[in-house]
Amino acid sequence: DIQLTQSPSFLSASVGDRVTITCRASQGISSYLAWYQQKPGKAPKLLIYAASTLQSGVPSRFSGSGSGTEFTLTISSLQPEDFATYYCQQVDTYPMTFGQGTRLEIK
Amino acid sequence: EVQLVESGGGLVQPGGSLRLSCAASGFTVSDHRMDWVRQAPGKGLEWVGRIRNRGNSYTTDYAASVKGRFTISRDDSKNSLYLQMNSLKTEDTAVYYCARRGVGYGGYDYDDYWGQGTLVTVSS
């Protein structure tokens, strides 16, 4: 199975900060990666797919980049509603796997 | 408006069975690949399995942890998806989500709509 490792696992930041989350794959997955945001008690929400394509309706402060084994999710200016847990997911190879998550909290 | 609504969760004893349903509206389930994803309490997301669309003969794939015990099916007349879970174990305790593979290209698609989830608790 392809392992996805996110870093950091926990991030404390302030409103207005620029933050970056990294997702590393145990083998190359081209650009077949998505990023999801999940808030407590809610279903995940798709933010980015195909590594860098912004899902419809998602604010432009979210962006994704990378290919192969290293990917990043960047939030350019944190807003209060962005404090949540973020997951990457690869769809290159079965089984589809998720990263362990990055919890983003208010400093 | 696209909506997915799961139902059928509850408390079941180890070794028991449960059938989850996912009712779709706002789109035709048979046109899309559909996933089941679960999340144990306080833990991360785990992909459970997928059923392909009509054009791909409704074939299925499963995570190793559930293969041989769980079965995904669909009823196009009811625009619904199902997850039959047999031989349940305590480690199957989780919120179960159904999700629609609705965006992407080049044959690779991603879950753009998710249900609210249904909790399955396996305990004696």
Image: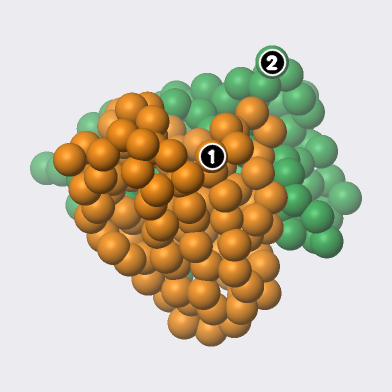
Nearer the observer: mark 2 or 1; the answer is: 1
Instruction: Please tell me which residue is depicted at 63% across the width and 73% down the height of the picture.
Output: A67
Instruction: Please tell me which residue is depicted at 25% across the width and 45% down the height of the picture.
Output: A13
Instruction: Please tell me which residue is depicted at 59% across the width and 62% down the height of the picture.
Output: A65
Relative placement, left or right, of B11 versus B37 is left
* Residue bearing the label numbered 1: A61
Crowd band around label 1 with a 10 angstrom C-alpha radius: few (<14), some (14–19), many (20+)? few
In the rendered view of the protein, which quadrant contains the C terminus of chain A?
A: top left
Give amino acid for label 2. Glu
Numbered marks: total: 2
Which quarter of the figure has residue A6? bottom left
Instruction: Please tell me which residue is depicted at 74% across the width and 59% down the height of the picture.
Output: B108
The dot on residue B1 is 2
Q: Colour of chain A?
A: orange
The dot on residue A30 is none
Q: Is residue B68 visible?
A: no
Dot 1: what SS?
Answer: loop
Q: Colour of chain B?
A: green
Point out the residue furthest to the left here: B124
Find residue B9 and report its horizontal and vertical position in percent. 35, 30
Q: Is residue A67 above or below residue A27?
A: above
Which quarter of the figure has residue B121? top left
Relative placement, left or right, of B41 versus B97 is left
Find residue A16 and report its horizontal and vertical position in percent. 36, 36
Q: Is residue B98 above or below residue A31?
A: above
Give amino acid for label 1. Arg
